[in-house]
Amino acid sequence: MRLGSKDKSILESAYRITENISNSGLSIYDKIEIGDPDLWIPSKELEFLLNEKLRGLDLNSLPLRTRSKVVKSRICEVLGYPVPSSFTKTKPRFPGQNFDTYTQKSNNLQIWNEEISASRRYVLIRVSPENIISKIKVVTGDMLSSLDKTGTLTQKYQARLIVGDKNMELVSPKDTNNLTSLVSENYTFSSKTSPTDYPSAESLLSIETIFHKLKPIVGQSFRDLGSDQERNRGAELHRLVCEHLGYSNYKDDGRFPDVKHQLLEVKLQTSPTIDLGLFRPDSQDILDIPKINGRQIRHCDVRYVLFYAEIINDTVKITHFFLTNGEDFFSRFPQFQGKVLNSKLQIPLPKDFFD
């Protein structure tokens, strides 16, 4: 596969980290601080690396248990870890990089005896009918929970959007204390700047600046693609957000948060119920991105933009706009209480999941 310049850069970054791991003498069971620029492999880099090194691996009709060990051993080698003489039954299986592996011949993902974790990563390995690894996807627990359409899973967190009197509301006048010293007001987007790039101290706009840039979206409309097209509806809004922030191109890699470059999660609401999946916006869990100026970024540092819309004559019209950081989220949007399931979970993956 021919790689573009950004893809090559991602792989080069991954190779640098795996070399550091190899030189460190660490095992897969030694904890690494999330976001460590030298030893932590972010999900995007992890997915590129595993696809580069595992695709085409012939499992040669091995028994399931042997196949699992072969795959895990190969992953250790690829990431720069020594292969253990035996694999301990830890949760997750690769504690050092915080991920589990699932080798899939079918689109029916089964997770036994534990609930999906919002902070854990899941490496899903696609195997062809000929027992050859064809594609790897790295996803978070929240991404997995959003794929379930059977009702097997419940949304762990939900909140209520109460519109109020104002059609535009900056819920958080300032960013979290952790983020305040990292924001910049002088950043100019270049034509190569992508919404999915990692944020830096030079590129992060303040929450107040983001608010002023996105205000003009209120009153805008786009075509309604139908109640069964929520993802595409959201994509239309996502394009508008990227355009008003100043990006030359819209891009969405399906990872949290939507506009990673600005630590911004985008939500389109046509009903008062806000689905938050497995993430609590006010959680102090660490986000899976490299540190910024030595600081780990937490879920509560993420900025949430919510647009409330009415559907009129096959048109989605934006009527209200709210912006808050995760830390203040539940102070404005009351939380519903949900239940957690503790059983075998079966998640049917979409047919195009590995495409």
Image (cartoon, grey):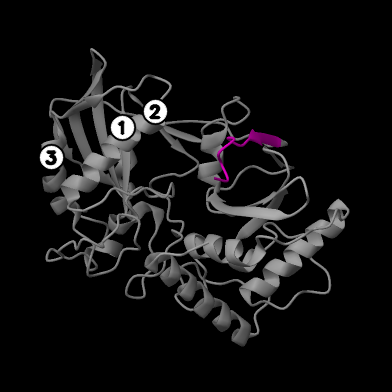
Q: Type of residue at label 3?
A: Lys
Residue linked to disc 1? 268
Count residues near mark 2 (Cα–Cα under 10 Å), then give few for <14, some for 14-19, many for 20+. Answer: some
In the rendered image, the residue lying farthest to the right is: 63
200 shown above or below 239: below
Disc 2 secondary structure class? helix
Of pointers 3 and 1, the one earlier in the residue sequence: 3
The vertical placement of 204 against 171, above or below, is below
Residue extending furthest toward the front: 2
Q: Nearer the viewer, residue 53 or 122?
A: 53
Which residue was labeled with disc 2? 230
Q: Specify whether 30 is left or right of 303.
A: right
Residue at x 15%, y 51% (from the top left corner): 208
* SS at mark 3 in the image: helix
- Report the Cα–Cα distance between label 3 and label 2: 22 Å
Q: Main secondary structure of the magenta part?
A: loop
Q: Is residue 224 visible?
A: yes
Amino acid at pointer 1 = Leu
Q: Residue at left 50%, top 41%?
A: 278
Q: Is residue 334 visible?
A: no
Left/right of residue 315 with respect to residue 198 in the rendered view: left
Pointer 3 with pointer 2, Cβ within 8 A: no
Identify residue for label 3: 215
Residue 294 in percent (x, y) is at 36, 75
Start and end of the magenta stretch?
345-355
Within-10-Å neighbours for mark 3: few <14, some 14–19, many 20+: some
Q: Are marks 2 and 1 in contact (CB under 8 Å)?
A: yes
**Residue 116 at x, y = what percent?**
61, 44
